[in-house]
Amino acid sequence: MNVLIIGSGAREHAFAWSIAKSDRVERIFVAPGNGGTAMMGGKVANISVKAADISELLDFARQHHIGLTVVGPEQPLEQGIVDRFREAGLKVIGPVQAAARLESSKVFAKEFMRRHGIPTSGYRVFNRKDEALAYIQALSSDRFPQVIKASGLCAGKGVIVAAEREEALLALREIFEDRIFGSAADEVVIEEFLRGEEASVFVLTDGRSYRLFLSAQDHKRIGEGDTGKNTGGMGAYAPAPIVTGEVLRKVEERVILPALRGMIADGSPYTGFLYVGLMIDRGEPFVVEFNARLGDPETQVVLPLLKSDLFDALLASVDGGLSEVPFEMYEMSAATVVVASGGYPDAFETGKSVTIDAGAEAADGVMIFHAGTVLNDGNLETSGGRVLSVTALGATLKESVDCAYQAVDRIHFEGAYYRRDIGAKAL
């Protein structure tokens, strides 16, 4: 069977790497892919079609007899790519447009959780600056921090945690007057601040049954010690020790099952990947956000820990019978370190030559997944903010972290930046 993977990041490189291991897959096309997927060779090839060009992707899938399409990023899901492919009789991994609102609209997600009794923070919704400012002004000082979110998609960056009143007022003026988040913040959600430790749980579902990947913990801030600006993610590890068996049981009973049943009740059964972003406080899980796809960089640690055939599970999630397909994990740990362009998440330069020393991936269990790279006349160059995601497996978390950093030391490009404390919190 031929497979089409949509996206250009390290997540999509990890998908290609994992799916390519299946004997049932003949060809894998990545649209548009990156330098890493371009260098895979064998059954994997890039195609020059953008992830947002749904009509062209649909034409390609028809012409090249694509048996399964895997959607990586959120934008095509928001635009209804799953609806379009299904209408054409094509198999595709992801939720329909109406169900993808769990990610594409924070307002929809909060109202959905309230309606179906899913634990989350208290919130208010505003589409006018004066009303939002008045709400913040009226809060007592002990109600801070407050979390201010753009309702729409912002590539993981539309969130401001305001520690004090003045910070919240400034944030709202920047959102409504300076339009720092554009039209994604036509509606703004102001939430109560949840205390605890963050972690993520990942689900593959056919709408009724589901399978769980290992939990993971992301590192969103650019600076060590979780300081500085939010990014798309500077590293991750799995499994997350904070997600104990008891916590996971609560997440299944209080979040996953109510969400899947709620989507069926609301007339939009949810299929594909569901990312559950959690805050865990003294063993009690609360939902921070839902995503309608696997996270990045968490994908780069959860997929290498999947022992079973990913392709078989993906196909079963479309055809039905997902609960009957093997879905076994390695009893190991994984860590990934993101190597970014200097200046990210603010302004950064691209076109820097990338050198990866021979033997960087020689150690057993080391994988380098490309994100912001491109092959230019055979030379590997940077093309984005997050450049590489260096993953390693180990018997323990410390082993996987140490191995990942040893591989990072073998990567070179001008201005390369990475956090040196990935996994430190768990260790």
Image (cartoon, rainbow, N blue to C red):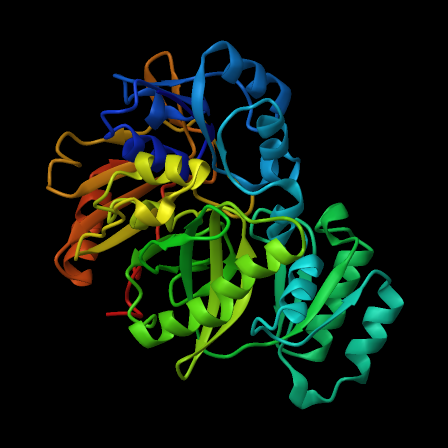
Residue under the image location 63 percent in, 33 percent down: 83
Q: Is residue 97 visible?
A: yes
Asked if residue 324 lies left or right of residue 291, the reply is: left
List x then y, in percent, for residue 115: 68, 69
Asked if residue 225 lies left or right of residue 112, the reply is: left
List x then y, in percent, for residue 19: 31, 32
Instruction: Give the quadrant of the N terminus.
Output: top left
Asked if residue 381 lies left or right of residue 305, the reply is: right
Depicted 173 relative to depicted 194: above or below: above
Residue under the image location 14 percent in, 58 percent down: 399
Residue 315 lies in quadrant: top left
Residue 192 lies in quadrant: bottom right
List x then y, in percent, for residue 77: 59, 39
Q: In terms of depth relative to the viewer, which is nearer, 313 or 344?
A: 313
How many numbered circles does the render carry? Answer: 0
Instruction: Give the quadrant of the C terminus.
Output: bottom left
List x then y, in percent, for residue 273: 46, 47
Q: Is residue 413 visible?
A: no
Residue under the image location 19 percent in, 43 percent down: 407
Q: In terms of depth relative to the viewer, which is nearer, 243 or 170?
A: 243
